[in-house]
Amino acid sequence: MKNVLLFLTLFTLSAASFGQGNNYAQNYKKFEGLAQTPPMGWNSWNKFACNVDEKLIREIADAMVSSGMKDAGYTYINIDDCWHGDRDSLGFIHPDPRRFPSGMKALADYIHSKGLKMGIYSDAGSQTCGGRPGSRGYEFQDAQQYAKWGIDYLKYDWCNTEGLKAEGAYKTITAALRKAGRPVVLSICEWGNDKPWEWGPEVGHLWRTTGDIYNCFDCVKDHGTWKSFGVMQILDKQEGLRQYAGPGQWNDPDMLEVGNGMPVHEDRAHFSMWAMIAAPLIAGNDLRNMSKETLAILTHKEAIAINQDKLGIQGFRYAKKDSVETWLKPLDNGKWAVCFLNRSNTPQKVNFDWKNTPISDELSKRELNAAKTTYKIRDVWARKAQGNTKKAYAATVPRHDAILLVLSE
């Protein structure tokens, strides 16, 4: 009898230990069902860098609604670096009390009251890129705090990550977010160094494919210890990545610079290409003070519809001739988006013979064959019909600009 009791006691202890061990198992997979189309919103960094406070964020939220951007599909108000204050005695992070005296919960409540969602920023390292407290070693506490505040989106950067492996570090924050229980879109901001497109689809909802964007059409900005890139340089770095994109998982070529100083035609080309490559549309300008041209680009519903197409297929460059690139993107209901991008400093003529140029896309298993099907042509930016594919398309693309078309049966 004693042997039986001893066996039952040991079995109970063993089962309890095994059960306890199961409690520590981690879920390294992102929240499902989020970001089924590329996320749309606003981020503070491109325009304001570290100069953020709750007054600014509330005003931006107000402007997103009053400007019509919310109605156009923009959802997230994302605070980037430099919101942080100190950690308390238990290690929980708090916002800078001078910049955010009302606290993050009150700010999130305000944003939610506008029908918008709130995003925040942290870093996988010991410090953020701006020198504020990073999440390394505090991932689970930070995730609990974000859930308590009502955060919907987390941009997670990669500064000061000495000795860390990217995939493991991002799995840790994903596990922390899952444990906290509030569904959060995770933006992996690892700059493409460790090929996040290969492991990111299970861990996050979007992943940066490059270093930072810079507010110019075609340039590289040397900061000494690092470089940032113009729109065309960022675009070129997307080559070979389209197979990784789709609903819930997006290549992220960084935030929009529309409205931050480039000429209107360059902003239009920038937005056209981000639409074509199914990039997240995260505005980075001052929404409180936009020109009518900037607002018209950011809220252009037909261009946004190309980006937000439910198939989630990233476009591809079909041809390049005399600095004019021809890009195509398969769309739902048998439609195609076609973009002629002029990268040169002079206007360029295009002449595209639809009937004698059948195009097959191996990735989507779709074919554009105007010899078999006649498509109606619509000029997106001009908002008008342009005939059909029975005859060749002829136009002149201004310098550093783009013509964006939609073909439908």
Image (cartoon, grey):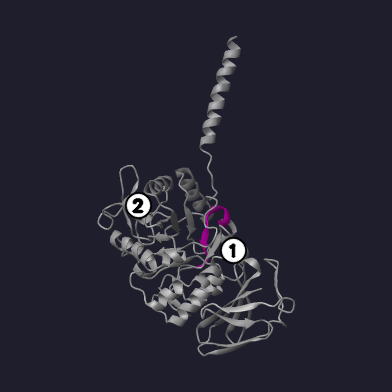
Decide: is 346 above or below 6.
below
Tell me if residue 209 is in the magenta stretch: yes
Decide: is 185 above or below 382.
above
State which quarter of the image contains the N terminus.
top right
Q: Is residue 44 visible?
A: no
State which quarter of the image contains the C terminus.
bottom right
Coordinates of residue 80 in the picture (x, y in percent) = 38, 61
Decide: is 325 above or below 288.
below
Would residue 377 be found to the left or right of residue 121 on screen?
right
Element at badge 1? loop
Where is mark 1, residue-wise?
A: 312
In the displayed orientation, state which residue is furthest to the right.
372
Coordinates of residue 256 in the picture (x, y in percent) = 45, 70
Coordinates of residue 100 in the picture (x, y in percent) = 28, 56
Residue that appears at 45% across and 44% down: 180
Residue that appears at 57% across and 13% down: 5
Is 143 or 353 nearer to us in this picture? 353
Q: Residues within 10 Å of mark 2 (few under 14, many from 20)?
A: some
Is 227 or 274 nearer to us in this picture? 274
User: To which quarter of the image does residue 77 belong?
Assistant: bottom left
Q: What label sits on residue 109 in the rendered view?
A: 2
Residue that appears at 34% across and 63% down: 62
Is 109 or 119 nearer to us in this picture? 109
Gap in angstroms between the C-alphas marked 2 and 1 = 31 Å
Part of the protein shown in magenta? 200-210
Coordinates of residue 60 in the picture (x, y in percent) = 34, 64
Q: Residues within 10 Å of mark 1 (few under 14, many from 20)?
A: many
Is 242 or 9 nearer to us in this picture? 242
Tell me if residue 62 is in the magenta stretch: no
Three-letter code, disc 2: Asp
Three-letter code, disc 1: Gly
